[in-house]
Amino acid sequence: MKKILNLFKNPKVKMVIILSFLLFIYTTICAFSYAENVSYDIENSVFRLHVIANSDSKEDQDLKYKVRDGLISYMKEICTNCTNKEEAIQLVRNHQDEFKQIALDIIKQNGYSYGVNINIGNFEFPTKNYGDISLPAGYYDALRVEIGEAKGQNWWCVMFPPLCFVDITSGIVPEESKETLENNLSEEEYALVSNDSKPQIQFKFKLLEFFNENGFITAKK
């Protein structure tokens, strides 16, 4: 122990320790700044859909997916020519009543009388994969649809660019959707979300997930 203490008294050793500590602080600050900026850009380039079922019963979960399909189908009709998130949000806001009515009609057609609560806001999302596209956890603008008591499992997707497709089992994101996403992100940001297999890109995505999921990066709204 005495030898170790004497070692710390050595000016050169002390300098190495100080420099190492400063390097660690600098690297942490740079990593946080990078994660915050990239997270902000990604979150501000997509508009998401969040559907919450009445309960976790099989019937209510099946109904949730039917409502989802109807909403996505309508979104495709009105948002074909959208080029950015702001246009998509404005369209949804202008047609908010129609979205609600579509959900209510589907619920009624399936023999239920649940009410529907719809609102556009900024909500927390976990890391989600859409085919070969992955979005990190964070706060995203979204259309939230609550069915009945909204006590069931959630379903998330991306309304703009249209990464949520009705045939979710196919696991394939349409190329035009990828192009729209790519046009709204920087080259590096797109590489992060497009499941690039390069170790450096994977590490950066994990870094982004870590800061978001541990609450170091919070809502910008």
Image: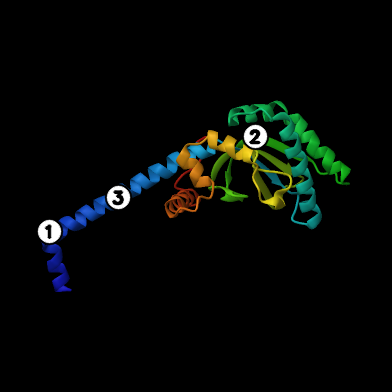
Q: Quadrant of residue 3?
A: bottom left
The residue closer to the viewer here, 113 or 100, is: 100
For numbered disc 2, what is the local secondary structure?
strand
Residue receiving disc 3: 25
Residue 100 visible to an observer of this rendering: yes
Q: Please, what is the three-letter code of the amino acid marked with disc 3?
A: Ile
Mark 1, other Cα within 10 Å: few <14 / some 14–19 / many ≥20: few
Sooner in the amino-acid sequence: mark 1 or mark 3? 1
Image mark for residue 12: 1
Per the model, the C-alpha gap separating discs 1 and 3 is 20 Å
Per the model, the C-alpha gap separating discs 2 and 1 is 59 Å
Q: Please, what is the three-letter code of the amino acid marked with disc 2?
A: Ile
Q: Left of 141 or right of it: where is 151? A: right
Residue receiving disc 2: 120
For numbered disc 3, what is the local secondary structure?
helix
Mark 2, other Cα within 10 Å: few <14 / some 14–19 / many ≥20: some
For residue 10, above or below residue 31: below
**Residue 210 image offset from top left, x and y in percent:** 46, 52
Sooner in the amino-acid sequence: mark 2 or mark 3? 3
**Residue 21 image offset from top left, x and y in percent:** 25, 54
**Residue 31 image offset from top left, x and y in percent:** 38, 47
